[in-house]
Image (spheres, coloured by chain):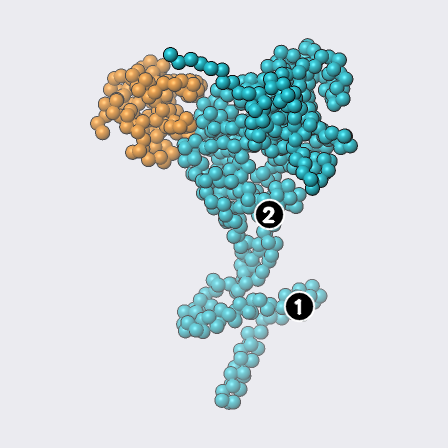
Chain colours: A orange, B cyan
Amino acid sequence: MDIGILDVVVKIAACVCGKDGVISQIEEKAILEKVTSAYPEYTIQKFNKAIDIFFNETLQIEDYLEHVSGTDLNNFTIDVCEFSASADGLDIKENIALHKVKLILGEEL
Amino acid sequence: MSRFADASPDPKSHIKTLMRIGYTMPSAVSDILDNSITANAKNIEIYSLPGLQESNISIVDDGDGMSPDELIHNMKIGCKDPGDERNRGDLGRFGSGMKTASFSQARKLTVISKKEGKPICAAVWDIDRIENENTWCLEILDEDEIKSHPLLLLGNKKEYGTQVIWEKLSCLNKTNHSLDDETIMASNLSDLGDYISLHFHKFMDGKNKINFTINDSQLQGIDPFMTRSPGYQEGRSEKLRCKGGYIEINTHVLPHFKRMEANPLERLGGANGIVQNQGLYIYRENRLINAGGWLGLAKTSQLGALARVEVNVPSSLDQEWATDVKKSSLQLPPRIKKELRKFLSDPIKRSKRVYTYRGKQDQANKYWNIQENENDKIISYQISAENDFLIDIFRVIPKEQKSQLIKYLGQLAENLPLNHIYQKMSESPRDIEQENVTDALLEAIMSRVFEEEINE
């Protein structure tokens, strides 16, 4: 897999977790953990850079989701989002962004 | 077809609005200090010397200073776009602070500055002149005028830096029955010292510390969390990633009042101040913006008096946090409120625990407990409620007699002849013999009961 696409996955997870412009440490750790456990070549430096860029961009979640295609990547993206969004105990059922990810990437609700 | 008319504000009226933006004297001086810190000053001196015919305030720093062009640009009101991104450590925001803060306290603002490799320069805003001429006319002083300025400190004491001078002070607020200028100013300076010591305390410590002085007297930082006091408790902390860095949340529980040393307690406003100032301490780039209060997230209570939540916010979040021109208030974004709520219960709970702490309990033997309360510095000897024999008695006796027995045991503990024990234990401890006291007690009770039965 192109490692660059993982930046997009990280940004989608950041959109899901980063409501109102902040991501908790637990959520941040969860995103990194999930991505690096599947792709150990994805370094923390790459992750930090992707998050910094994310905060400076004005793109919407749909813009990032456009770049994700293929069943494996779709499932992986949903997995990362779900894992990180529930990491700090927030009610993921209320998470509209997560619903959107699932809907667009094709998981049945 | 529509047309446009010039509706720019009338300088005479506009300046009056700017004068009433709501600064207090300490918050206005703090806005000037923000600029000095941003300009990398290591020494910031505030002077308001007594004995002058007209009181004035001078704030002089050894920061980077300004060139003549930079000075004129910075003397404009709103010289910076609040939407622009600021560097880390830049305490400015609206490009209006120095002017509006100064106009709120004085009718004449002079700024003298010297930057390395540039000539000394000075500019003056005089409200009387603005009102008389109804124009934004900034006076630029030439070198001779600067050097002969009676309040000039910059050239003499510091090679580079900036001096802000407030004259024609309106902050003295004189009425018919008010005290003289010097008395009012002395009181204002005392309040100012406390305010700076608290709001800039993070700059007064560590490797890059800045020296703050008022009339050559050095200010000492006030740590609102008493982190170096015995009994201080550090709680949970969390970092939230955001645009431009991290929001850091740390929780603290102060030691109990009785364990606080007199000086720090007094500097934090005494016991009343400790109760009133419980809550959130929000720092923007290390400068305290909000000192206490729960901002609607929790209720102020006596038991929560020792709870403090420190929130460090980077200036990149000013827009989201709705920082005002004075940088003395802000609004919490909804997500931050949600995150903060998770942190409030822990320090409040621990504050309650410290408050209601009854002290540690040691079992002297099966019958007696020793209770030591470090907060109240009290030691007491209590009858053990865990004694199996006593529990058995309570199981078999009727309810009325249970309360009688509790009362008796309470009296027994209260009336322990401690002084006598202490005296005899120190004088002749070997003479004390407790082993056969139970037989003597039994004998005494039996004979008393027997006597009563005969009388009946």
**Comparing labels 2 and 1, the label whose residue is closer to the camera:** 2
Say if mark 2 contacts mark 1, CB within 8 Å. Answer: no
Above or below B427: residue B308 = above
Which numbered disc covers residue A7?
none
Q: Is residue B85 visible?
A: no
Above or below B113: residue B246 = below
Along the line of sight, which residue is nearer the eye, A8 or A15?
A15
Q: Residue at x 42, y 30 (%)?
A: A24
Residue highlighted by disc 2: B271
Residue highlighted by disc 1: B420
Quarter holding residue B416: bottom right
Q: Amino acid at mark 2?
A: Ala
- Residues under labels 2 and 1: Cα distance? 37 Å
Residue B337, x across and y down, in percent: 43, 35
Residue A40 appears left or right of B144: left
Q: Residue at x 63, y 16 (%)?
A: B138
Q: Chain of mark 1?
A: B
Along the line of sight, which residue is nearer the eye, B130 or B2?
B2
Q: Earlier in the sequence, mark 2 or mark 1?
A: 2
Q: Residue at x 58, y 26 (%)?
A: B16
Residue A12, x across and y down, in percent: 34, 22
Q: Is residue B134 visible?
A: yes
Above or below B454: residue B232 = above
Disc 2 is placed on an element classified as helix
Residue at the extreme front of the image, as rendered: B1
Q: Chain of mark 2?
A: B
Q: Quarter of the image for the N terminus of chain B: give it.
A: top left
Along the line of sight, which residue is nearer the eye, A89 or B330?
B330
Residue B334, x across and y down, in percent: 41, 33
Q: Amino acid at mark 1?
A: His
Quarter holding residue A80: top left
Residue B133 appears left or right of A10: right
